[in-house]
Structure formats: structure tokens, C-alpha cells
Amino acid sequence: MKIYNDEIWGYFLVIFGLFLIFMSPDNIFVLKITSIVLIIMNIFMIIKVKSNNSLLLLFSLIGFINISIGITDGLNEGVGVSLWQSLGLRQYSINTVIMKSLFLNLIILNLFLPNNKVRASNSDINLSRRTSLIISSVGCIILFSILIYALFSINSTVGIYQSVSNPLYEYSILIVGFVWFYSKGFKIIDYFIGIYSIIFFIFFNSIGDRSSVFMLLTLLFLIYGFKYIKIRILTFMMVIGIPFVNFIGIFRTQGLSIFDNIATIILERGFYVDTISWAYYTSLTIGELHNRLSEPFQIAFGFLKGILGFDSPYYNLPVFARDNFLDLYNAGGGLYPSYFYAFGGYIGVIFGGLILGIIIKQLFLNNSNKNSLFRIILISLAFRWYLYSPSTLFRGLLIYTTILWLITDWFYKITNRRE
């Protein structure tokens, strides 16, 4: 059996990482060491999957988030963030614990991606597309109906951020994916997707909903720029993207008053992205629930109930933490591993990594029509389910996407049989 050099490095990182996580104290020094290893592990994973375009984009998104956290919240200890964060949980052991949890999650994912399978499983997503004018046309009608509803139902003020809590707009990304998937050979559908996207970008950017815009941009880049998914191109986009995101964030909060100094401010921020750093702090409050509640497993059960549509106070953990503990104030969000730490400590993080690893292995290392569409959705929603809440992964991908697939696949087979 051939052993690749990067596999040797992978084994070393796994062994060193497990020792660091389970055998070292939770202090500032270890926080910085963990941050360095987290950055190295993300770079290693990106290089490891570089021959698989879909995996490369997925782990570049995760890596972008983790590297920003490793530098801003780990090595720089969150310098420059809001005062209430600096005086809060960043001073306590949970800060190091959550950084370790991010690293542990990557270690688990690495085990599900053997080099030979990664190299052999790359396939152009365009090859698995289907042709159904009815499905794609109905999808377009639904998309524009949702857009019209948004334009008239959301009271927006240009330049002022407004939280968009309706999941309808977030999950409309799924419909865009299905419309594209079933429109092979219909250029007019591509034009409709383009028109929809332009209106979507303008409107949701005007109210500061960058996450929805970013998810749609990711989807469009994946389906129309698949062959351009290369490390050098993604690196260039990151170098350009971070200052651009910071520019929007600064302009949104401070307006034209700081326009003369905006270049200096952006350079000072470096890898700091406010959305990512604030979500990381929320992760600390979520993880701290594991220490505050006498039966943390009830959090996992309540979260599962919420995913299935039942009412549960534990479905939205950031809100639960903020409402029940004065010192756990947060601005929302929360990274994927932090939820599982709240469920069961490091054992919970391992379990969460196993779930995600199984999903990734099934979708990315086994080529089929269904898997191709599902991996498009998984990557497009990655910014949401990894940075904000795993509920988007379980509800958006495993439930809603599955239901849409069963309906459209059944209709596609019925209509093809009649023809």
C-alpha cells in the first residue's frame, strides 16, 4: 500500500492534536498553540483535497473561517473586538476549549478522506444534470414569487443592517440549486437565474444581510465556475474578499465619516472579519452551557426536537444562553463544533465530527446524480451551518433537500416514462 507524504503529515497532526486536546491545560499559552495548529491543519486539509474541486471549495470555506478565528481570536486574543467580549468569556478556559473543539472536528473529518479516494472521486457536477423544463420553470416561478414577497414584506433602509429571520429566503438557495440541476440545455433558465441573483444581491446587500448573499455567490461560483476552483484562484478571492467584507461592515456601521481612513482601518483589521469573530464568541457561550446545566444531554434532545419541528427552548442555543445567563450575552451564530460540545463535551464534538464526516464521505466520494446535487447544497449552505448553526445542515440538507429530491425525482421519472 502506497503511503503519501501528506498522509504522514496527517498522522503526525492527528497524534499531536489529540495529545494537545486531551493532555494540555486550558490556558492562554495552549490557546495560542492550538490556534497555530488549527491554522496548519486547515492548510493541510486544503492541500490534501486540492485534486477534488468540490471538496476544495468546501474546505476552503471552512478554512477561511477557522484561519480567521485562529489569527484574530487565538493568536491576537480577540484584540480589537467589543469591550464586553474582551471582559467576558475570552478570559476563561472555555476559550481554549472551543478552539480545541474546532481542531478536534478537523481531525475527525481528516480520517474520512483517504488520499486515494479523494484523488479518484473528482467529477464535473455538470455531467450529472437533468433536463426538465417543467421542474426548472416551476422553480423559477417560485423563486421570483419569494423575491417579490421579500421586496414588499421586509421594511428596509439602505445601509442599515436588518436581521432577516425568515428561513424562507435562506432556503431559497435550495430552489436555485434544483432549478439549475434540472435545466440542462435550457440557456433561458440560466438567464432567469442571473436576473434573480442580481435583484437578490442588490436587495439583501442593501439591508446588510451578507450571509444570504454570500451563500448565493458560493452556489453560483460552484455551478458556473466549477473548472476555476483552484487553490491559487481561491487564495486570490480570499485576499480580495476579506478587505471587501470589512469595507461593507465598516461602511454599514460608520458610514462616510471614516472614508478618508478606511484603507488604514482595513489594513489594521487584517484577517479579522466581524461576523466570524462574533460567531466565535457566541460559540464560547454555547459551549459554556455544558458546564452550567446539570444534564447537558437534555440540550441535545431539545435541539433534535427543534430540528424536527417541535417547540424547544434548546433549539436556538444562543438565545437560550443569552436569556438565562446574564454573563452569556452574545450576538448570535455559533460554530458547528461548539453545539456538540454543549451536548456532550469533547465526546459530543467527536460525535458531531463523525456525523459530518459520514455525510461528506457519502456525498463527495460516491458519484451519483443525487449526491452531485446534495453536495452543491451542502457547499452552498456551508457558511451558514458551520458558522451559525448545524440546524441548517440537518434541516436544510437532510430534511428539506431530501423532500425536494424525492418529489422532483419522482416527477422526472414519471414524465420521462410517458415520453
Image (spheres, helix red, strand yellow):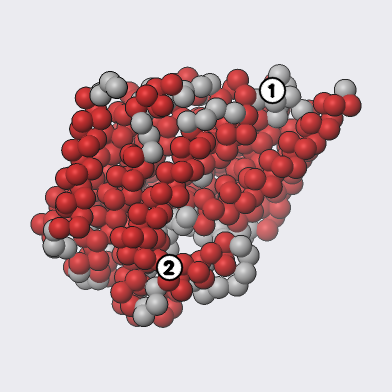
Q: Which x, y percent locates residue 415? A: 84, 30
Residue type highlighted by circle 2 = Pro
Please, is residue 13 above or below residue 292 in the view? Answer: above
Q: Residue, x 43% and y 78% (percent of image)?
A: 323
Residue type highlighted by circle 1 = Lys
Total marks placed: 2
Q: Which x, y percent locates residue 95? A: 23, 62
Q: Quadrant of residue 238?
A: top left
Please, is residue 413 above or below residue 103 in the view? Answer: above
Distance between the alpha carbons at the discs numbered 1 and 2: 42 Å
The one of 326 and 287 positioned closer to us in this rendering: 287
The one of 273 and 160 positioned closer to us in this rendering: 273
Q: Quadrant of residue 130?
A: top right
Q: Residue, x 25% and y 66% (percent of image)?
A: 94
Q: Quadrant of residue 7?
A: top left
Relative side of 194 to 337, left or right: right
Label 2: which secondary element:
helix
Q: Residue under label 1, please give it.
A: 184
Q: Which residue sits furthest front?
A: 1
Q: Which mark is residue 318?
A: 2
Task: Answer whether residue 292 is visible to the viewer in this image.
Answer: yes
Relative side of 133 to 243, left or right: right
Relative side of 370 to 91, left or right: right
Q: Residue, x 16% and y 51% (percent of image)?
A: 19
Q: Which x, y percent locates residue 403? A: 69, 47
The one of 400 and 169 positioned closer to us in this rendering: 400
The image quadrant where one finds the N terminus is top left
Label 1: which secondary element:
loop
Q: Which residue sits furthest left?
A: 29
